[in-house]
Amino acid sequence: MNLRPRRRPVPAIPIVSLIDIMVILLIFFIATTSFNDAKKQVKVTLPTSESLGESVPQQEQRKALTITQAQEIFLDGTPVKVEELGAALLQMKERNPTVKLELQADTQTSLGLLLKVWDALRKGGHSVNDVPARILSPQ
């Protein structure tokens, strides 16, 4: 008669395959992690060009919609109030349906004024995406 209990065999865990799975998961997490905090701390001064964007072919010449540093709006050199800008743009489009605009704004222009100008562009029949914006820095 045997009084000792039998020992159960210890199950074997395949460590090599677990290491492979761990490496694959590690690579996946490293590849999909975005490091946004590191990007916010880097300050980059972008270069500027004085010659790019100056020469435009004559048939592509655009009418200027300018916002000055004093928050004044000029449509092709003529001063216009924000409230009247939509009607002025609509009249310009009726006179010349193929007219193209270019928004030239000062760096000190408020976002509220830009939103009003974009609303006026929509009222005037222009798509905001078709009006390129140039932000002018004071010199």
Image (spheres, grey):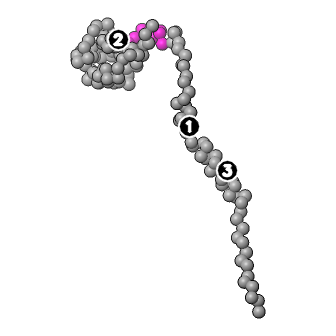
Residue 73 sits above or below residue 23 on the image: above
Does residue 62 belong to the magenta stretch?
A: yes
Displayed quadrant of residue 131: top left
Region of the chain picked out in magenta, as a range: 53-63
Residue 109 sits above or below residue 8 on the image: above
Cα–Cα gap, marks 1 and 3: 20 Å
Is the stretch drawn in magenta largely helix, strand or loop?
Answer: loop
Instruction: Name the residue at the bottom extreme.
Output: 1
Q: Residue at x 29, y 22 (%)?
A: 116
- Amino acid type at circle 3 is Val
Q: Is there any visible trace of residue 125 in the rendered image? A: no
The residue lying toward the viewer, choosing from 53 and 92, is 53
Residue at image mark 2? 68
Displayed quadrant of residue 105: top left
Secondary structure of the residue carrying tag 3 is helix
Residue 41 sits above or below residue 45 on the image: below
Secondary structure of the residue carrying tag 1 is loop
Secondary structure of the residue carrying tag 2 is loop
